[in-house]
Image: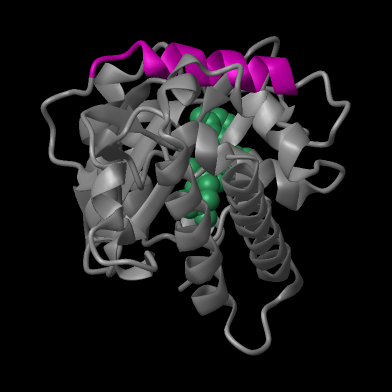
Amino acid sequence: MSTTRMAFEQLPSVVISAVEERTGPVLKTESATEGRNSQVGARVHSESGVCFIKGLRSDHTWAWTQRREADVNPHIRKVAPALLWEVETDGWHLLSFEALEGHHADYSADSPDLPLVADALCRLGRIPCPDVELRRAEQRLAKYVNNTGDAEQFAGNSLLHTDMNNANVLIDGRASLVDWAWATRGAPWLDAAYWVIWLMAAGGHTAASAEHWARRIPAWHAAPGVAVNAFAQAHANLWEEIGGDEPDPWTARMVRASREWARHRSTARAMARQVR
Ligand SMILES: Nc1ncnc2c1ncn2[C@@H]1O[C@H](COP(=O)(O)OP(=O)(O)OP(=O)(O)O)[C@@H](O)[C@H]1O
Ligand SMILES: [Mg+2]
């Protein structure tokens, strides 16, 4: 489900006043071009500087994702912008973050952004999983694995981002990860695996070259091959379900990439059996 984005100025006046109590008078706003989940997402310029504000109505199905982002933020400052304040009033919940400059990560094959993204995932891997309520990878993926019980291989105690969409990675000399709505607890190699699918979807990466980038993340090396195979297949199933019969072009890329990766993994497994 995606949400219709509205301009910051369309918020109720009570909500805008609550913002201005914290920022001073708003001078200018720029709506984010990317992002499909927040009802409001904008860089807000005021006398006190610039911040990035995202918001959802408090009764929105996904209102809990705002809470998740706020709870996890103090623990992820080595990879993400700081939460400056939050406010809940007149039926709206807003989060205000330090505004980042920079561009969305370019995931194409020869992009200079790729080592920076790998570095951000390495930094994330060194953060201990905080004691906050998080989704669990094995529960999120249980419905999509081919064999009952396969999802248990995704369980673990690492903090994961799980939405490595390039629009959630901002590059400004180094990579920062935004949008922690789907922060999850699970096996340490999962974010590298999510990245493989996004790299392949960006175009220009084969499964082998995308996995080459995943190898930059130390946790990837400890990932059991069978668990990665199950992860790839689960995501082929997941994106097929999201895409349905007529996926939009964006979803169609994810369907193709995840299918291709799952096929690559099962072919590699069959070849390994023949060699033995
Ligand atoms: N701290 C920030 N500073 C500057 N720009 C930001 C910041 N955080 C997010 N953005 C920009 O706003 C866009 C939307 O933000 P975000 O991804 O957090 O919201 P979302 O609508 O929930 O997205 P999604 O649909 O991916 O869940 C990002 O793709 C990014 O371009
Ligand atoms: Mg996003």
Question: Foreground: 221 or 139?
Answer: 221
Residue occupying image coordinates x 29% and y 44%:
153
Between residue 67 and residue 92, name the one nearer to us. Answer: 67
The residue under the point 29% across, 54% down is 151
The C terminus - image quarter: top right
Q: Quadrant of residue 38?
A: bottom left
Magenta run includes residue 119: yes
Q: Which corner quadrant holds the N terminus?
A: bottom left
- Name the dominant secondary structure of the magenta segment: helix
Indicate the position of residue 55 as horizontal and vertical percent values.
38, 51
Q: Is residue 4 left or right of residue 137?
A: right
Total tally of numbered discs in the picture? 0
Which of the four quarters of the rendered structure image does ligand 1 lie in? top right
Residue shown at 63% from the left, 89% from the top: 245
Q: Is residue 162 visible?
A: yes
Q: Is residue 228 left or right of residue 58?
A: right
Give the magenta range: 114-128
Report the residue that reaches farthest toward the front. 276
Q: Work out whether 36 lies above or below 112.
A: below
Q: Residue 131's image quarter?
A: top left
Residue 111 percent across, percent down from the top left: 84, 26
The reply, left or right, for residue 177 in relation to residue 266 is left
196 in the magenta segment:
no
Q: Residue at x 48, y 14 (%)?
A: 218
Instruction: Left or right? Give the position of 157 relative to 194.
Output: left
Work out whether residue 193 or residue 29 is closer to the camera in this orientation and state it.
Answer: 193
In x, y percent, where is residue 269?
58, 48
Q: Position of residue 207 (x, y in %)?
A: 72, 43
